[in-house]
Amino acid sequence: MGSRGTLTLVSSVVLLAGCTTTTSGGSAAPAATTATTTASAATGCGSRVETGPLPDWADAGFSGDARVPHVFGAKGDIVAVLFAHPLRQVRDDGSNNKILWVARAATTSPAPVAPATLVITARLDGTDTQVIREVRGGPGPSIIDLPRAGCWRLDLSWSGHTDTMNLVYVP
């Protein structure tokens, strides 16, 4: 890789390091993973969107070297596979904000008293706006529309487990 490619790679890593919310216990992305950061200009919040291969625990149903945009939860226990990227507040083209939620196998065993439903509490950064979305049956396919564009901080809970992530919805 030439010096220009190295500079671009280093700049991307530095930019992404300031925009992610990984906590200890999270899993590192594969070395060949590429990532982009979608930022909300109003809040400075960002969402790291990986474009490399899905981790082995999340690639069931995908063939070959599946490269689909995805976002990891801060703990690394769940991934949001984005079939519509970027996510949009309004989709005039007839498409939708389809997200496939995939939890690590070790986190899918239901706790005796915890509901299997994936509950998403979404808060719009810098506002009092909060909405709740549910994915019946736990992590799986969903359409997640949110009422305004911006950076949404998601608290995710399912089967006695929790994780968090940021997703940016554009106008």
Image (cartoon, grey):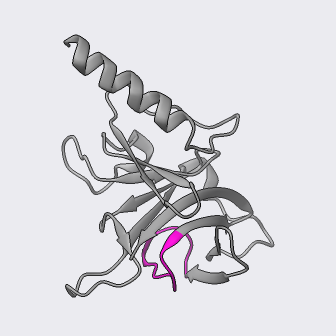
Q: Is residue 141 magenta?
A: yes
As drawn, 22 above or below 156: above
Residue at 33% in and 64% down: 86
- Nearer to us in this view, 98 or 5: 5
**What segment is highlighted magenta in the picture?**
136-150
Residue 149 x, y percent position in the rendering: 47, 76
Q: Is residue 30 visible?
A: no
- Residue 87 in percent (x, y) is at 38, 70
Quick check: 161 above or below 119? above
Q: Quadrant of residue 132?
A: bottom right
Using residue 50 as the reference point, say whether residue 126 is left or right of it.
Answer: right
Type of secondary structure dominating the magenta stretch = loop
137 or 85: which is nearer to us? 85
| 145 inside magenta stretch | yes
Placement of 49 over or under 122, stated as above or below = above
> In the rendered view, would you say 4 is above or below 74?
above
Indicate the quadrant containing the C terminus: top left, top right, bottom left or bottom right. bottom left
